[in-house]
Image (tube, rainbow, N blue to C red):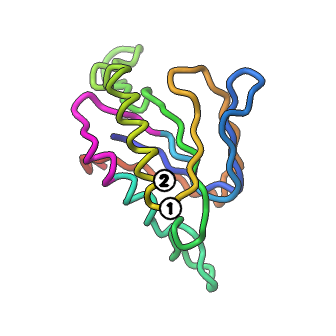
Amino acid sequence: MRAVVQRVKRAEVRVGAEVVGQIGAGLLVLLGVGKDDTETAGAALAEKIANLRVFDDGGGKMNRSLLETGGQALCVSQFTLYGDCRKGRRPSYDQAAPPRQAQAFYESFVTSMRKLGIRTETGRFRAMMDVELVNDGPVTLLLDSERKF
C-alpha cells in the first residue's frame, strides 16, 4: 500500500454536493492499494500512521502522534498512487489492485485505524470526489508498506 499523509487543520471530501467525510485537526490519508498487498500490510501501515510523530509538542518540535493529540483521520482511496509514469505519457496502473480487492483492503485499513482509537472518516470508494483541505505546516509524507521510499 502507498499513502500520502498530510497534516491538516481540517479536511473534507464531497461526492457531488454531499459531504461524505469531514475532520478537524489531524491527518488526511490518500491510500492506494497494490495488487500484491495484504491485510497485514494495511494493519501495519495504519499502526505506522497513527503513531507518526508529526504534531508539535509544547516546545514546537514535531514529537507527538495522532494518538497522543486525539486528532482525526480522513482516509480517501486513490488508486492513482500506483500510476507508473516512467514510460510514455499515459500512466500505467498495472500494479494497482483490482477494484474488489482494493475496496476490501481499503476498508480493512480504515477498520484498523478505528481499532487503534482514531476517529476515522472516509471518502466513497470508486466515486469522483472533491477533497478540500487546509494543510498544516505544510507537512506531507509519502509512505509505502514495502518501504520502497
User: In the picture, residue 139 is in which quadrant?
Assistant: bottom right
Please tell me the numbered disc located at residue 117: 1
Question: Horizontal placement of 90 versus 119: left or right?
Answer: left
Residue at screen point 35% across, 21% down: 100
Left or right of 120 in this view: 136: right
Using the image, tell me which numbered label, if any, was put on residue 48: none
Numbered circles on residues, count: 2
Residue ID for mark 2 = 114
Where residue 26 appears, as percent x and y from the top left, is 61, 58
Which quarter of the figure has residue 70?
A: bottom right
Q: Which residues are magenta?
A: 31-44
Give, as a three-letter code, the residue at label 1.
Answer: Gly
Horizontal side of residue 94 vs 57, given as left or right = left
Residue situated furthest right in the rendering? 17
The residue depicted at 40 percent of the width and 44 percent of the height is: 109
Secondary structure of residue under mark 2: helix
Viewport quadrant of the N terminus: top left
Give the image location of residue 36, x and y in percent.
21, 32
Q: Dot 1: within a 10 Å radius of its alpha carbon, few (fewer than 14), some, or many (20 or more) residues?
A: some
Q: Are the residues tagged 1 and 2 within 8 Å (C-beta)? A: yes
Q: Is residue 5 above or below residue 107?
A: below
Residue drawn where x is 39% and y is 19% of the image = 91
Percent position of residue 93, x then y: 34, 20
Label 2: few (<14), some (14–19) or many (≥20) C-alpha neighbours in 10 Å: some
- Front residue (pair 76, 18): 18
Q: Is residue 41 magenta?
A: yes
